[in-house]
Amino acid sequence: MTSPTIPKITRCRWSSDDDADRFSVENPATGKVITEVQGGGADQMNAAVESAHQAFDGDWRWRDRTERAGLLLSCADALEEHADELADLLSLENGKPVVDARENDVRFLIGVFRFFGSIIDKLPSGDFHDTGSIYSATVLEPFGVVGAIIPFNWPPIHTGGKIAQFMPDLLARAGFRSRHDLRAGFRKL
């Protein structure tokens, strides 16, 4: 395993300045602090949600499915390009062997983006049913901003499973970046 460069304090656009919002990320194998994450409070969360709404209404909802598919596949390519780095970070944070992180978690993460990128422009839209007295239509379109809770175990798998099927571009524009989940992929896009 290589030693990835990790800042002493990990911040993102939505980090607060309040020390009470800071928490440590430890390597469970050694107990050593990997980084301190400067989290956020209610004000930062509300600002992030507002920014996500603006990005959705101003950009993402108007992109066609082919363009969205291309963005998802670009995410998969970028993640694959940084797969070893992501596996090293995951191993440090979760204590699992690097090989398991690379061949299971990171591989699955890349696959999730490839899967949704490959089907998004093939899903039916405008499915019409006319049974005489009843007429119904289904139109698939972006829903809007969603909140997704990510459990501590298998963060790349859970994060990728939620983001890939929703709005990767929107989250990137809104400044979402966890300790390692999709960091390399979103930074490149």
Image: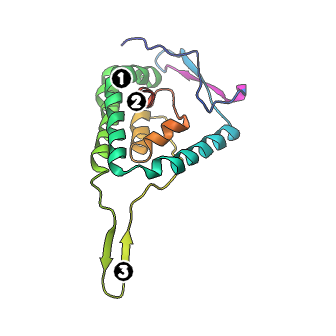
Residue at position x 41%, y 22% in the image: 91
Give the structural element (helix, strand or loop) at label 3: strand
Q: In which quarter of the image is residue 114?
A: top left
The answer to the question of whether label 2 and label 3 lie on touching residues, with beta carbons closer than 8 A, is no
Q: Residues within 10 Å of mark 1 (few under 14, many from 20)?
A: some
Query: In terms of sequence position, does the residue under pointer 2 or pointer 3 come before the other?
Result: 3
Please state the extent of the stretch shown in magenta in the rendering: 19-27
Q: Is residue 26 covered in magenta? A: yes
Q: Quadrant of residue 3?
A: top left
Point out residue 96 in the picture as x, y percentages from the top left corner: 39, 24
Q: Name the residue under label 2.
A: 185
On screen, residue 58 above or below 86: below
Point out residue 160 in the picture as x, y percentages from the top left corner: 40, 39
Q: Mark 3 points at which residue?
A: 135
Quarter that holds the C terminus:
top left
Q: Quadrant of residue 182?
A: top left
Query: In terms of sequence position, does the residue under pointer 1 or pointer 3 come before the other?
Result: 1
Which residue type carries mark 1? His
Q: Nearer the viewer, residue 162 or 26?
A: 162
Point out residue 75 in the picture as x, y percentages from the top left corner: 36, 34
Give the Cα separation between the discs numbered 2 and 3.
Answer: 43 Å
Q: Which of 3 and 188 is in front in this view?
A: 188
